[in-house]
């Protein structure tokens, strides 16, 4: 039971927690630069997390139950059972609060579909201005940069939008 609990349950749990923190910290940047790949990576993360968590919880539960049968000692085994139950509660809360919303967002993005739609990008003012009308969806910065490359004299970008992924677009265009 100690190996099952400390290495498989706690150790792998920490690894996934660290990976989740890194992904959450860099997700916005990754989504701007590599939308489909980053979205597919987030989907893969959630799949691996919940698959391994199920394996961990079941393994620790069975190991603790076996310890009771073989040794008759219940103290640490019941503590391990309690931790398994707590883990189920925590993973259930995370499933509905974080995983499902992210899967609903990243699923379509992974296959190239952005539910926001695409903005209309026009060149106006004899090539001196570029107007972006509509939602700022993923890929908008690349489209605007393409127009800037075609019209190097453009000095103004007009945003006529109710919003979207504005911070990602502005960060991408300013680099």
Image (spheres, rainbow, N blue to C red):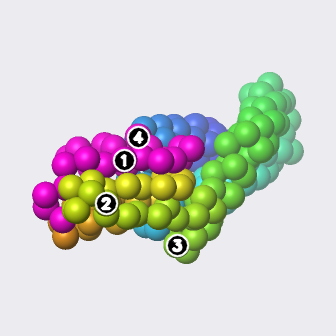
Q: Identify the residue at horizontal 77%, vertical 37% (top origin).
A: 93
SS category of the residue bearing label 1: strand
Q: Quadrant of the N terminus?
A: top right
SS category of the residue bearing label 2: strand
Would you say 139 lies left or right of 12 here? left
Q: Which residue is mark 4?
A: 167
Task: Judge by depth and name the residue closer to the eye, 171 or 24.
Answer: 171
Q: Which comes sooner in the sequence, label 4 or label 3?
A: 3
Q: Position of residue 38 (x, y in %)?
A: 44, 60
Does the magenta segment cover residue 154? yes
Determine contact: label 1, label 4, CB under 8 Å: no
Which of the labelled discs sits on residue 158, or is there none?
1
Q: CA distance from mark 4 to mark 2?
A: 24 Å
Q: Which residues are magenta?
A: 151-175
Task: Judge by depth and name the residue closer to the eye, 18 or 137.
Answer: 137
Determine contact: label 1, label 3, CB under 8 Å: no
Dot 3 crowding, Cα within 10 Å, few <14, some 14–19, many 20+: some
SS category of the residue bearing label 3: loop
Q: Which comes sooner in the sequence, label 1 or label 3?
A: 3
Q: Identify the residue at horizontal 36%, vertical 47% (top origin).
A: 158
Q: CA distance from mark 1 to mark 3?
A: 26 Å
């Amino acid at each position: 039971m100690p190996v099952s609990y400390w290495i498989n349950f706690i150790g792998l749990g920490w690894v996934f927690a660290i990976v989740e923190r890194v992904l959450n910290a860099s997700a916005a940047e990754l989504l701007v630069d590599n939308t489909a790949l980053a979205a597919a990576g987030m989907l893969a993360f959630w799949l691996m997390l919940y698959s391994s968590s199920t394996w961990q919880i079941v393994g620790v539960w069975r190991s603790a139950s076996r310890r009771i049968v073989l040794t008759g000692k219940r103290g640490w085994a019941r503590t391990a059972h309690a931790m398994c139950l707590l883990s189920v509660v925590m993973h259930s809360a995370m499933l509905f609060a974080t995983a499902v919303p992210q899967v609903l967002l990243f699923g379509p993005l992974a296959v190239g579909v952005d539910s926001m739609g695409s903005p209309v990008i026009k060149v106006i003012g004899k090539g001196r201005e570029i107007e972006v009308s509509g939602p700022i969806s993923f890929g908008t910065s690349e489209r605007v940069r393409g127009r800037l490359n075609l019209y190097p004299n453009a000095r103004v970008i007009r945003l006529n939008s109710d919003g979207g992924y504005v911070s990602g677009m502005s960060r991408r265009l300013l680099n």
